[in-house]
Amino acid sequence: MDDPRLVCLGNLTIDDVILPDGTERPGCTGGDALYACLAARLFEPRTEMVAPVGSDWPAAVSARIRAAGLSKAGLPPRNLPSLHNRIDYHADGGRTWTLFNGDEAFHILSPTIADIPAPYLRAEIFLILAMTFEAQIHLASGLKRTSSGLVALDTQEDYILGNEPALLKLISQCDIFMPSAEEVRQLLGHEDWETAARTFASRGPSVVVIKLGAEGVLVHDRATGRTIRVPAQPAQVVDTTGAGDSFSGGFLAALLHDRTDLETAARAGTIAAAFAVSGYGAAPMFSAKPGEARRRLHALAS
């Protein structure tokens, strides 16, 4: 296949999902790289992921990933079990993540610059998804050395406290910053989203996207000073685990087609997120169709 235009860097996971009503769905296929990559491919087929594969990763899932058109070149093997999470959702909309493997395994199962196939380094955009903070730092610096592509950063709320100065430095090295509302609260201590977006943009990123869950997203363009709000798309919500990652993939894929049209990119992201929440794990992203995604995007523009 042609070299990818977008590369999603992150993890593959096995997730046990527990809903507020006590419903349990163990063993869901997940991982931020998988959600983001499948979402991006709804709008840009030249998208690949780099995500290490654990020793017990199900062969059937690997086959399904390959059947979806993704290359095994971005799936380096690791000699330890796959990342395994328990995700407890609360009635107030919050959630608690429990990683059974521990931080060392999380780091080993996060991608490194050496894991990225040489043709992938010619991509136009790289999305660094949530992983260990150290792994994100190394990827960002490595990509700046080895590639001319834009670097988009999606942070993780678990490591923010105590790492604020270092994280702000990392943000300054990225072109697009895509935090969640909770990550903004932890970093800046307030909920004035527009002010927060401008604060982050002043540190370096040309585009800041704050993901607000059911309230949609706020997007700020540093070059024009423009800030827009785009609502979430209506959806039958089953499992929100990969919504933010799917948004990020859809947003960046659409951005490849017009770097100045942030509103359309945000709409594409919300469409991808709506697919993601409609079932458990990454299953709805495997079954989502590019034609339907484009139809929905066209309908929003008309």
Image (tube, rainbow, N blue to C red):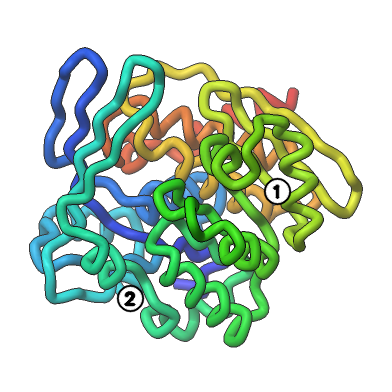
The residue that label 1 is drawn on is: 208
Q: Residues within 10 Å of mark 1 (few under 14, many from 20)?
A: many
Give the quadrant of residue 239.
Answer: top left
The residue that label 2 is drawn on is: 73
Give the quadrant of residue 294.
Answer: top right
Q: How crowded is mark 2: few (under 14 residues within 10 Å), some or many (20 or more)?
A: some
Q: Position of residue 104 (x, y in %)?
A: 24, 68
**Quadrant housing the N terminus:** bottom left
Check the image and report above or below for 211 versus 236: below
Residue farthest to the right, as pictured: 224
Name which residue lies at 33% across and 67% down.
110
**In this view of the protein, which residue sits in the foreground, 296 or 8?**
8
Q: Where is residue 183 in the image (x, y as percent from the top left)?
A: 53, 43
Q: Position of residue 25 (x, y in %)?
A: 15, 30
Q: On the picture, is 277 further left or further right than 181?
A: left
Marking on residue 237: none
Q: Where is residue 180 in the image (x, y as percent from the top left)?
A: 54, 40
Disc 2/disc 1 C-alpha distance (Å):
31 Å
**In this view of the protein, which residue sits in the foreground, 179 or 104?**
104
